[in-house]
Amino acid sequence: MKVLLGIVCAVLVSLASTAAQEEKGLSVQSRDNSLNELAIQFLESFRQSMVCGNPDLGIPVLAPFQLEHTEIEIKQKGLEFKGELNKVVVDGLNEFEIKNIDIKVLKLQLDFELYFGAIRTKGKYKAKGKLISLFPFNRFGSFRFDAKGLTVKGSAKVGISGDKLQIRDLIITPTIKSVRSDVRSVFLNPITNFVFNRVVEGIVPGMINNNQQEITQLIEQKLKPAINEMLGDVSLQDLIDMVSGGGGSGPVTC
């Protein structure tokens, strides 16, 4: 969730200038196009700085992103998996393409679409469960897991309170084309272990693509309060400086 937090914060920061800057002498369309370009430039700069993180926004290093520990549970037809992932390294988060940025100034709204060709994950696991209700397991080992063709579409509306920016509405919808699973030593029999990974590859995309409403609600419930808390410590002028490069607090390449 910290990964999405970082990316959404970058998108919101790019919207901050619309609350306090107005392009004089430009038509509405020209102004919006100008702000769209500003947002794209900021996101491109943010992508480069993901190897550093952004201390001003409390965003950790995201390329690669490292997670010491997390719990995981999958309960689907054909697979039950409950356990923990440790020493997780996620690579490829800074390789996204900006498919769409559309700022609606009057609504203080930003629509966006990002595409990740491949996100590569590796680490250690410890888990127990059942494969197709017939083969129980209680094992540990290493894993590699690649998510391919991940599209993240979203829309954010903000409001201004004094010199603070706050999110009013946040909608994020992820979809995925396929995954590649290489979880090792779940079964001693290599054929059964092969079947296990193919089952995972068949189940995971459907878990994401077929449960859009639940995932969108979960992301909003988790991200919206976290981002508003983060934004509460930063003034609107600070956010504008991050977009424009003023004050030296914007994304930097290290």
Image (cartoon, rainbow, N blue to C red):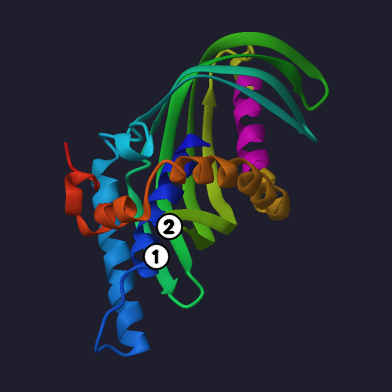
Which residue occupies 31% across, 71% down? 21
Q: Quadrant of the C terminus?
A: top left
Question: To which quarter of the image does residue 207 belong?
Answer: top right
Magenta stretch: residue 148 in it?
Answer: no
Question: To which quarter of the image does residue 98 belong?
Answer: bottom left
Q: Is residue 143 left or right of residue 93?
A: right
The amino acid type of the residue labelled 2 equals Leu
Residue 26 position, x and y percent, is 27, 88
Span shown in magenta: 192-205
Which residue occupies 30% across, 63% down? 40
| Front-lying residue, 194 or 43 | 43
Residue 227 position, x and y percent, is 50, 44
Asked if the residue under mark 1 is in contact with the one under mark 2, i.e. CB atoms within 8 Å, the reply is: yes
In what element is the residue under mark 2? strand
Inter-mark Cα distance, 2 to 1: 5 Å
User: Against 141, is 132 above or below?
Assistant: below
In what element is the residue under mark 1? strand
Which residue occupies 36% across, 35% down? 62
- Which residue is tagged 2? 114
Residue furthest to the right: 133
Residue 182 position, x and y percent, is 51, 26
How many numbered marks are there? 2
- Which residue is tagged 1? 99
Residue 69 position, x and y percent, is 52, 18
Q: Magenta region's main secondary structure?
A: helix
